Image (cartoon, rainbow, N blue to C red):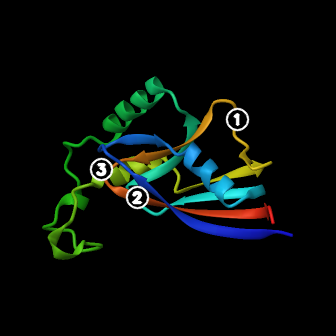
Amino acid sequence: MLRHHSEELVVETSEKIQFIDITDLLQQAIRRMKFLDGLLCAYNMHTTSGLWVNEHERGLLEDMKKKLQIFASDTEYYEHDDLRIRTENLEPRGMERKNAQSHLRSTFFSTNVSIPVHASKLALGRWQSVLYAELDGPQQRKVHLVMIGTFED
């Protein structure tokens, strides 16, 4: 019989741009919930970060940081950051971050990933890892997890 479970995963970031391998955290949640087979959906709750399935290799991650900087540099003018003209979606108490480049960079990533689970293990390819792409850190981030399938009784 199919069942489901959901929970929140907290990811602590320590850098402005950072790629954190969360594969082991997802696998721990699967073991903790005794999830056997089905689908794990991880949903990022933020607009200046994302999820990414790719190879966790230092050179590739450094290359991605360089490409993100070229795509949306920290030194350009962005209307989103100009509080003289921006009137929407503002933080209370004047705590607005100047983070247009982070919003733009997040378009390279997804808000969610869905991964099959078989025999209580993520069914990832040989070199695949699930990476959390922090683009406006450091911050505490949340990823909502939903597991749909069969669980150990």
Looking at the image, residue 92 lies above or below residue 22: below
Query: Label 3: how many residues lie within 10 Å, few (<14), some (14-19) or many (20+)?
Result: some
Label 1 with label 2: CB-CB less than 8 Å: no
Which label was assigned to residue 138?
3
Could you tell me which secondary element the residue under label 2 belongs to?
strand
Q: Which residue occupies 73% across, 57% down?
A: 39
Could you tell me which secondary element the residue under label 3 belongs to?
loop
Looking at the image, residue 133 lies above or below residue 34: above
Which label was assigned to residue 141?
2
Q: Is residue 135 left or right of residue 98?
A: right
Q: Which residue type carries mark 3?
A: Pro
Q: Earlier in the sequence, mark 1 or mark 2?
A: 1
Q: Report the Cα–Cα distance between label 2 and label 3.
A: 9 Å
Question: Which picture quadrant has residue 124?
Answer: top right
Q: Report the Cα–Cα distance between label 1 and label 3.
A: 30 Å
Residue placed furthest toward the right:
1
Looking at the image, residue 96 lies above or below residue 77: below
Query: Label 1: how many residues lie within 10 Å, few (<14), some (14-19) or many (20+)?
Result: few
Q: Which residue type carries mark 1?
A: Gly
Q: Which residue occupies 68% across, 61% down?
A: 33
Q: Is residue 69 left or right of residue 96?
A: right
The foreground one among 76 and 152 is 152
In the rendering, at what x and y percent does residue 137 appear? 30, 50
Q: Which residue is mark 1?
A: 125
| Image quarter of the C terminus | bottom right
Q: Which residue type carries mark 2?
A: Arg
Total marks in image: 3
In the rendering, at what x and y percent does residue 28 appear? 61, 51
Q: Is residue 117 left or right of residue 105?
A: right
Q: Earlier in the sequence, mark 1 or mark 3?
A: 1
